[in-house]
Image (cartoon, rainbow, N blue to C red):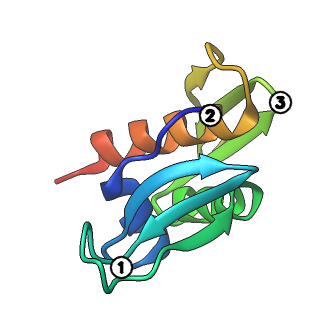
């Protein structure tokens, strides 16, 4: 399964987060990279996908996703980009949000 960047996860969850791995539809992450005292936390990937779509909306983009594809549109519904070279909806939404993050930086 695909990985999510530290930058995107931090932007979506609102703090410095360090993604570790995905197991059983849960993304495991820490707030402090490799500190032994930092507890491992988790979030369901479907809940995270919803939060990523909300984050994209705050950035001025609308994400429309189905199991193997995600479209990026502007709020006025102008087509921007499509991500369809994936196996899961989570992967397509993650790729779309990574694209937004990279192309929205000032």
Label 2 crowd (10 A; few <14 / some 14-19 / many >=20): many
Q: Residue furthest right?
A: 67
Please tell me whether residue 82 is drawn above or below residue 15 in the rendered image.
above
Image location (x, y in percent) of residue 78: 60, 33
Q: Earlier in the sequence, mark 3 or mark 2?
A: 3
Q: Residue at x 75, y 50 (%)?
A: 24
Name, please, the residue furthest toward the bottom.
Answer: 37
**Separation of residues labelled 1 and 3 (CA atoms):** 29 Å
Is 1 on the left-hand or right-hand side of 5? right
User: x%, y% of residue 46?
Assistant: 76, 56
Task: Report whether 21 appears left or right of 73.
Answer: left
Residue 42's image quarter?
bottom right
Q: Residues within 10 Å of mark 1 (few under 14, many from 20)?
A: few
Q: Secondary structure at mark 2?
A: helix
Q: Quadrant of residue 31?
A: bottom left
Quadrant containing the C terminus is bottom left
Where does residue 97 sit, x and y in percent of width and height?
Answer: 49, 45
The N terminus, quarter of image: top right
Residue under the image location 46 percent in, 65 percent down = 29
Q: Nearer the viewer, residue 39 or 46?
A: 39
Are discs 3 and 2 less than 8 Å apart at CB?
no
Q: Which residue is mark 2?
A: 91
Q: In the figure, 29 relative to 3: above or below? A: below
Label 1 sits on residue: 15
**Which residue lies most toward the top here?**
85
47 w.r.t. 69: above or below: below
Does the CB distance between marks 1 and 3 fall below 8 Å?
no
- Which residue sits at x=39%, y=55%? 8
Q: Looking at the image, is mark 2 or mark 1 earlier in the sequence?
A: 1
Distance from the alpha carbon under mark 3 to that under mark 2: 9 Å
Q: Residue tagged by mark 3?
A: 67
Quick one: SS at disc 1? loop
């Amino acid at each position: 399964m695909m990985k999510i960047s530290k930058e995107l996860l931090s932007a979506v969850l609102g703090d410095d987060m360090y993604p570790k791995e995905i197991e059983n539809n849960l993304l495991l992450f820490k707030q402090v990279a490799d500190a032994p005292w930092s507890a491992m936390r988790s979030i369901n990937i479907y809940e995270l996908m919803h939060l990523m779509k909300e984050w994209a909306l705050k950035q001025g983009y609308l994400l429309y996703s189905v199991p193997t594809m995600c479209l990026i549109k502007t709020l006025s519904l102008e087509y921007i980009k499509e991500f369809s070279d994936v196996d899961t909806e989570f992967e397509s939404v993650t790729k779309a949000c990574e694209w937004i993050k990279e192309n929205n930086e000032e």
